[in-house]
Amino acid sequence: MKAVQIVNPSEMQVVELEKPVVGAGEVLVKIKYVGFCGSDLNTYLGRNPMVKLPVIPGHEVGAVIEEIGVDVPAGFEKGMNVTLNPYTNCGKCASCRNGRVNACEHNETLGVQRNGVMCEYAVLPWTKIIPAGKISPRDCALIEPMSVGFHAVARGQVTDNEYVMVIGCGMIGVGAIVRAALRGATVIAVDLDDEKLSLAKRIGASYVINSKTENVHERMQALTGGFGADVVIEAVGSPATYIMAVDEVGFTGRVVCIGYAKSEVAFQTKYFVQKELDIRGSRNALPADFRAVINYLENGNCPIEELITRIAKPDTALEAMKEWERNPGKVFRILVEF
């Protein structure tokens, strides 16, 4: 079978691998579409310290069940459209003991700490197969990244009488905007790109701020009556946006951090104390977040076509990755079709 492999920084190729064989308690899926994640881009650029090269990327998946092994419970059928839960959990660490398996200390995400599924076929335990109802295999590839944004809103305990500032309107930020709006919050979306901000308004943001051309602090103060945001969700991962999050959250507010800053961040820590902030990390997603995204997509209110920037084939995956490298702020999701 064909697979896309990142061999070295800036070096990607198509390789031939043996088709996997299904075993007991496992499901064989035919991969239809796989999205390139930000972690895949960092791997390609040589900036992902968690990856050992060479690696097959990919964990944002739309697939169809091809074969079901013995000892798989009822509920899975050949031909069913599915996505995958790409995380592992050990069941023994503090996170697993507390029921937060998404943050397992020993997690291995597909395409990061282990080979991913940017290939024609994959075998996984049935517990990692998520039926996707009427959602097409192409659109299934959007479920996992959106679920990460949904999870951040859950971590922020967002309610309907709050102002929620979402910094970054990429795929994960889109998920956070949608989920916060579904909960009835007043969402303020911040980005550098007017096209992304326009989309943010159409999916639920009440207000948008272009941080390149506008004074973010003045706009936030005006929009919130001088109180600042009740919840800030950081979905970029840069020192500037981390500092912005702490600056713009109101007193006794919550800051939820999704993005990984690639360099050290210098905070005025007095704000942590003066504002008595809750600063929370948000990692991956839980099964409930996947189900919530599936419900949202099934309702037909998502402008899916605008979230898919390009569909590539395995032999044009390198070209697509180079496009993302050149225009990181203009890309939502690039999918590879098998």
Image (cartoon, grey):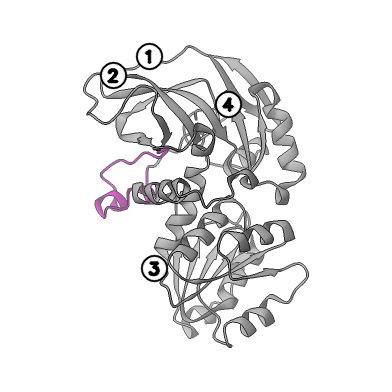
Q: Is residue 182 above or below residue 64?
A: below
| Lower position in the chain sequence, tag 1 or tag 4 | 1
Closer to the eye: label 2 or 1: 2
**Which badge, 3 or 4, is on the more N-terminal residue?**
4
Q: Position of residue 67 (x, y in %)?
A: 35, 18
- Find the residue positioned furthest to the bottom: 226
User: Does the stretch in magenta take in 226?
Assistant: no
Q: Is residue 273 left or right of residue 320?
A: left
Could you say which disc has been placed on residue 54 in the image? 4
Residue at image mark 2: 69
Question: Mark 1 belongs to which amino acid?
Answer: Val
Q: CA distance from mark 1 to mark 3?
A: 42 Å
Q: CA distance from mark 1 to mark 4?
A: 22 Å
Q: CA distance from mark 4 to mark 2?
A: 29 Å
Above/below status of 40 relative to 15: below
Closer to the eye: label 4 or 2: 2
Magenta range is 85-106
SS at mark 3?
A: loop
Q: Circles 1 and 4: CB distance less than 8 Å?
A: no
Marking on residue 157: 3
Q: Residue visible at 73% across and 42% down?
A: 325
Horizontally, residue 258 falls left or right of residue 78, namely right
Q: Quadrant of residue 79?
A: top left
Residue 21 is labelled as 1
Q: Dot 4, how many residues are within 10 Å of its Cα: few (below 14), some (14-19), or many (20+)?
A: some
Q: Earlier in the sequence, mark 1 or mark 3?
A: 1
Separation of residues labelled 3 and 2 (CA atoms): 39 Å
Dot 2 or dot 1: first in sequence order is 1
Relative side of 73 to 65, left or right: left
The three-letter code of the residue at mark 2 reads Gly
Q: Residue 161, percent across and down?
A: 44, 78
